[in-house]
Amino acid sequence: MEGRREFLIIGFTGPIGAGCTTAAKFFSNFENFDRFVKALISEENFSETNKQIYDLYKRMMLEYENKKKEDYKKELEKRLKEREFLKVLKYYYDETPYKFKIKYISFSKALIQELVERILLGDLEQEIKNFPNNELYLTIVSKIKDQAEQLLSIVNKESIKNFWKAIIARRFREIKQNKDHWFKFKKYLNAIDSLSEQIKKIIKEEINGSSKYISFLQDMGTMVRLKGSILYRFSEEEKFSYPHPVYALSYRINLIIKFFRHFDPDKYNRFVIEAFRNPFEIEFFRQRYYEFYLISLFAPFHIRQKRHPHIENLEERDKIDQGLDIDSLNENKKNELYEKFAPFIEANNTEEALQILKIAMQDTQKCVELSDININNQTDCKEELYKKLLFYFSLVLQPGFVPPSTDETLMNMAYMLSLQSTCISRQVGAIITEENGYIVGAGWNDVSEGQIGCGLRWRKDCEMLDNEILPIHPLSEERFREKIIKVNGRDRLEESFCFKDEYAKFKDKSKSLQHCRALHAEENAILQTAKIGGIGLKNAATIYTTTFPCELCAKKIYQVGIDRVVYVEPYPKSISEEVFFKDGIRQPKIEQFEGVKPYSYFRLYKPLFNKKDWQKFLKNNKIKKFLLS
C-alpha cells in the first residue's frame, strides 16, 4: 500500500515504431495530458457514455434474435467498463492531482549522457578506435564532442564527477545544503536532453542517415553493457559496490531517479522510462521496486515502416533490436560480430565471448515477453492509445475497479499451463474455447503422456542407462549416445539437453521439428478435445496461445475449424500467418493479445477491498483521504 501511494515507475518496450516515445511523452507533457484527461472526464463525455449505455440496454432487452442480443450485451459490458474507468480516473484526478505529475526519462538519452561523460571524463575516442571500420563512428563522436564541450559553460568536469559521487554515496544532506551546486547539476541534466535532440538533427543533416545513427546507438549500448558505466569508476573511488556491466544504463537511470526524488524542489515520485531494450535492465528495476510496471506496445511491421519511412533497412534494424539469434548465424557472420566487440569482452574463446555478447545486446522480443501489460497500437489515432494508457494507469491507482476481460483471463490460464512444460527451449500454453466461451481443450508443449521430458533428463542418465531403458537413438547410431556423454566437465554431464538440437548436429542437418520429442501446446489442446469426448471446434472456436503457432500447428488449427487465434509472443521465422492461415475459403482472425499479463494479473485485478466496502470507506472523509493518498 505504501509503495502504491508514494512511488511508481512505468516502463515502455516494443519494436522500433511501436509508439514507446509517444506513450512516454504523453504522461510527461502535462499541458497536453491535462487537456486530454479533462475532456475525457467532462460532464459532456459522461452524459454521452450514459446515453450509449441506456440505448444498448434497450436494444438488448427488446431484441428477439439471440445472436444480436449477445452482440448488444458484449458492447454494453464494454461501455459499462468504460464508465467505471472514467469514474475512477475523475475521482483520482480531482482528489489527488499530484499522482499525475510524472517525470520522463529515456534510455537513449541516458546513453548519450554516458557517452558525453566518457568524452569529458574518460577517453571515448580511444574506445571507438577499437571498433573495426570505425571512421563513421569517430565522425559521430566528434559531433557529440563539439556539443558536449558546450556543457562546460554550465558546470565543470570536477563538479559533474563530485555530484555523481554524492548521489552514489547517498550524501543527501551535503547536496541539499549546496543549492547552487544541485541547481547547476539539474541544468546540466536538462541540457543533455536538449543536446540529444540536437545531435540527432546534426547527424541526420550532415552525415545523411538516421539508420547510421540508430546503428551507432545500438553498438554503443552494447559496448556500455559489456564494459560498464563510467559511473562505476566513481563508485569504486567512493568504495561503494556497483552491479554487473550489463546493468550499466539501468544503474545510471536509477541514480537520475534518486536525484529527482530527493534533490529536485519539484519532488518527483512517479516516472516513465522509455524504451527498455535489454531484459536484464528490466530485472534491475523489477528486483528493486515493487511498483514497477512494464508496458509493451505492438504494431505490425508495415505500420511501423509507414511511421518511420526515413529509417533505411528497418527489417535489418528489427533483427538486431528484437534480439539477434547468434546461434543461427553462419560462421562468417559470427566471426564478424566477434571481431566488432572482441576488444570489450574478456573471454577464453570465441564461443564464450559470443555468449557474453548475447546478454549485452538488445533483445526487445524478450523484453516484450517480460512485460506486465500488452497494448496494440495499430492505428494512427493517438487518442485511442492515450485512453488505453489511462485505463491501465487507473488500474495501478485502484486495482480491481473492473474485472479482467475474457481474453485476459483465458490467456493468463494459458500462461499458467505453460509452466507445466519440461521443454528446455521454450514453454508454451494453449486454451481452446467453443463459441459460448467454455473451455473445451487445454495443453502445453511437452512429451507424450508416460514419457519423461527433456528438462528432467541429464546427459549423465544416458551414461548410466542403456538404450533399452532410455532409448535416444536407433540401434545403428550408438555413436549419438557417445556424443551426448562426451562433454567437458562433470557439471555438463548434469545438464539437460535438447534432443532435437543434438540430433541435428549429429546428422549435420538443420534443426527439424519432426525430431522434437514434444507435442506443441496447440496440438495437445486439440488432442484433448478429441480424447475427452469428441466436441466439435467449429462455429467461432478460439485458441489462446502464449506463442504464435508454428507451421505444423497452424495447419491443425485450420483443419479442426478454429475461427480465431489470439497470441502474445511471435514464433521465430514462422510463415503461418502469411501462408497457412490465408490459404483456403476460411481465414481465421489473427489477434495479438492485449491486456494484463501474468506478472501483474493479480496485482492489477485483485482489489484491496470488495466494491461494497470501498464505496462505504469513500463516504468517510478520514478513511477516504488515507485510501487515496
Image (tube, rainbow, N blue to C red):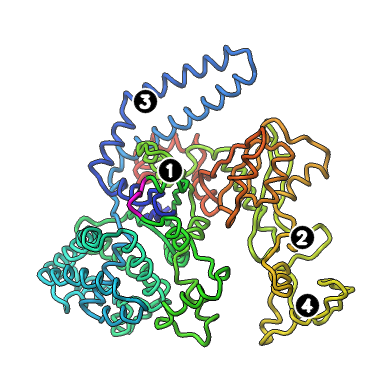
Q: CA distance from mark 1 to mark 4?
A: 48 Å
* Kind of residue indicated by mark 3: Phe
Q: Is residue 14 above or below residue 93?
A: below
Between 39 and 588, the residue placed more toward the observer is 588
Q: How many marks?
A: 4
Residue 465 falls left or right of residue 558? right
Q: CA distance from mark 2 to mark 4?
A: 20 Å
N-terminal-most mark, 1 or 3: 3
Mark yes or no: residue 359 visible.
yes
Between 173 and 600, the residue placed more toward the observer is 600
- Circle 3 or circle 2, nearest the eye: 2
- Circle 1 or circle 4, nearest the eye: 4
Between 107 and 209, the residue placed more toward the observer is 209
Q: Is residue 136 above or below residue 8?
A: below
What is the span of residues highlighted in magenta in the rendered image?
307-311
Q: Position of residue 409 (x, y in %)?
A: 59, 43
Q: Which residue is mark 1?
A: 377
* Kind of residue indicated by mark 4: Phe
Q: CA distance from mark 1 to mark 3?
A: 25 Å
Q: CA distance from mark 4 to mark 3?
A: 70 Å
Q: Secondary structure at mark 2?
A: loop
Q: Secondary structure at mark 3?
A: helix
N-terminal-most mark, 4 or 3: 3
Q: Which residue is mark 2?
A: 447
N-terminal-most mark, 1 or 4: 1
* Kind of residue indicated by mark 2: Val
Q: Are the two marked residues, 1 and 3, in contact with CB atoms closer than 8 angstroms?
A: no
Q: Are the two marked residues, 4 and 3, in contact with CB atoms closer than 8 angstroms?
A: no
Q: Which residue is mark 3?
A: 46
Q: What label sits on residue 480 in the rendered view?
A: 4
Q: Position of residue 334 (x, y in %)?
A: 51, 75
N-terminal-most mark, 2 or 4: 2
